């Protein structure tokens, strides 16, 4: 494993720089929107359109890679992401920022896809899980450090946008200068919703709930922190602790799901997240950063465990399309979540941030319990748990050992209805 990580170090360094810059702009955009006097609903739209761009990029980026290659695609998308971040400082036009958010989401998911397919082509089956774990740790670590960089300069100025842009453009250097061989085309899959639902309803619920909650957390968390009276340092610590909680519990909960029916672990995580959300509604504001750590620890692993649960019911030649379907369900949840939560916050106050999470997680846990009681679980797990965040979901799909059976190029399956 160590030799594989050393050999891929240029790609992983690029990931670390990219995610640190990206984490900073994820936190900065809603804060700047709040400082400009925009409503919670406006911030919700900004978050939702980012995830809309994220989903759209999953469909057209593979064609771009097939046309110009991994390195040129990475350089192109890095330039796009950098230009978008700098463009935020040009104007306070809401419509202009909405367009920028779509472009940002598409560029970021494209960068993920390039790196993850590259890693997939360079590692052997026996070390895939370890390499993916290292990659996921770098993703989450970069996102957390990016939140803390909010303290590097006042958010009212332009310096933080510049810092974010510098980090992202620097990510292109180790990737573009690497001597690691470029892989072939990125496999793409047009998924069938019927197949995804037929494979595992519990995984569909888990993916949707994870999207609803994580989309709101990343998009509206900084706004919530400001509205309850936290300063910028407090907001950055709150967000960083939420991500760190997910990073620390991702692998232990995943390994626990290898020993049990994974649905029980999903149920327990949702129930724990609901309890923590309820606590967050009633505790003093000074305890919120600590509570957010527990919230992240409970809810951040839900998507990865749902993906692993679906893999237990999926034949090898259908895993890519089922995984893509779950990614789309998660993405749709990430679009809807901020829209609904922002409207509730705008009408009833900041407490609705965690109150909405409480409702979603509680309803999700009841649905999972219903499926546990009414449907047979997997007899045995076909592969060990592979750690993945929502951001690195495509990596978990492609780096699953069974995806070796998927031919390179485009995989044609049913169009979404």
Image: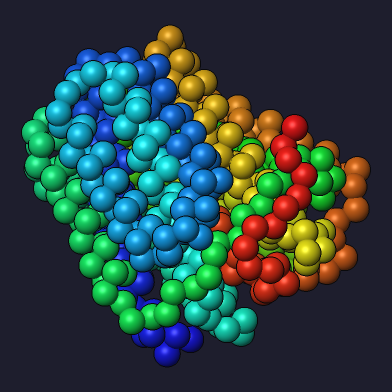
Q: Is residue 217 above or below residue 79?
A: above
Q: Is residue 98 left or right of residue 275?
A: left
Residue at 57% across, 75% down: 129
Q: Is residue 18 above or below residue 277?
A: below
Residue at 40% across, 13% down: 346
Residue at 44% across, 11% down: 348
Instruction: Residue 284: tell me if it is visible.
Output: no
Q: Position of residue 308 (x, y in %)?
A: 68, 60
Q: Position of residue 81 (x, y in %)?
A: 29, 46
Name the one closer to the observer, 108 or 220: 108
Q: Quadrant of the C terminus?
A: top right
Q: Is residue 234 above or below residue 72?
A: above
Instruction: Residue 313: tell me if it is visible.
Output: yes
Q: Is residue 197 left or right of residue 396?
A: right
Callout count: 0
Examine the image and state in which quarter residue 20 appears.
Answer: bottom left
Q: Position of residue 237 (x, y in %)?
A: 27, 46
């Amino acid at each position: 494993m160590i030799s594989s990580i050393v050999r891929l170090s240029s790609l992983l360094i690029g990931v670390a720089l990219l995610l640190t810059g990206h984490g900073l702009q994820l936190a900065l955009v809603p804060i700047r929107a709040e400082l400009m006097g925009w409503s919670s609903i406006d911030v919700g739209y900004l978050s939702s359109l980012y995830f809309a761009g994220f989903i759209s990029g999953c469909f057209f980026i593979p064609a771009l890679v097939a046309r110009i290659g991994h390195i040129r695609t990475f350089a192109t998308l890095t330039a796009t992401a950098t230009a978008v971040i700098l463009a935020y400082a040009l104007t306070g036009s809401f419509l202009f920022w909405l367009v920028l958010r779509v472009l940002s989401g598409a560029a970021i998911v494209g960068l993920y896809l390039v790196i993850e397919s590259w890693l997939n082509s360079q590692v052997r089956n026996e070390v895939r899980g370890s390499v993916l774990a290292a990659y996921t740790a770098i993703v989450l670590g970069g996102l957390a450090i990016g939140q803390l960089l909010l303290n590097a300069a006042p958010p009212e100025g332009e310096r933080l946008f510049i810092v974010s842009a510098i980090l992202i453009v620097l990510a292109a250097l180790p990737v573009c200068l690497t001597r690691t061989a470029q892989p072939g085309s990125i496999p793409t899959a047009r998924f069938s919703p019927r197949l995804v639902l037929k494979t595992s309803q519990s995984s569909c619920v888990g993916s949707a709930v994870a999207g609803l909650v994580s989309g709101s957390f990343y998009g509206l968390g900084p706004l919530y922190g400001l509205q309850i009276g936290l300063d910028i340092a407090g907001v950055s610590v709150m967000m960083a602790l939420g991500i760190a909680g997910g990073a620390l519990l991702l692998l232990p909960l995943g390994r626990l799901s290898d020993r049990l029916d994974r649905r029980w672990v999903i149920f327990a995580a949702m129930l724990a997240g609901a309890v923590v959300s309820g606590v967050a509604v009633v505790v003093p504001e000074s305890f919120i950063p600590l509570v957010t750590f527990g919230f992240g620890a409970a809810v951040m692993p839900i998507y990865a465990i749902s993906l692993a649960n679906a893999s237990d019911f999926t034949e090898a030649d259908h895993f890519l399309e089922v995984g893509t379907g779950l990614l789309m369900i998660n993405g749709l949840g990430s679009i809807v979540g901020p829209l609904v939560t922002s409207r509730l916050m705008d009408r009833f106050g900041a407490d609705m941030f965690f109150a909405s999470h409480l409702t979603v997680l509680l309803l999700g846990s009841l649905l999972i319990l219903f499926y546990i009681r009414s449907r047979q679980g997997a007899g045995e797990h076909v592969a060990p748990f592979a750690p993945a965040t929502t951001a690195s979901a495509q990596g978990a799909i492609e780096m699953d050992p069974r995806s070796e059976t998927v031919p390179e190029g485009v995989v044609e399956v049913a169009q979404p209805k």
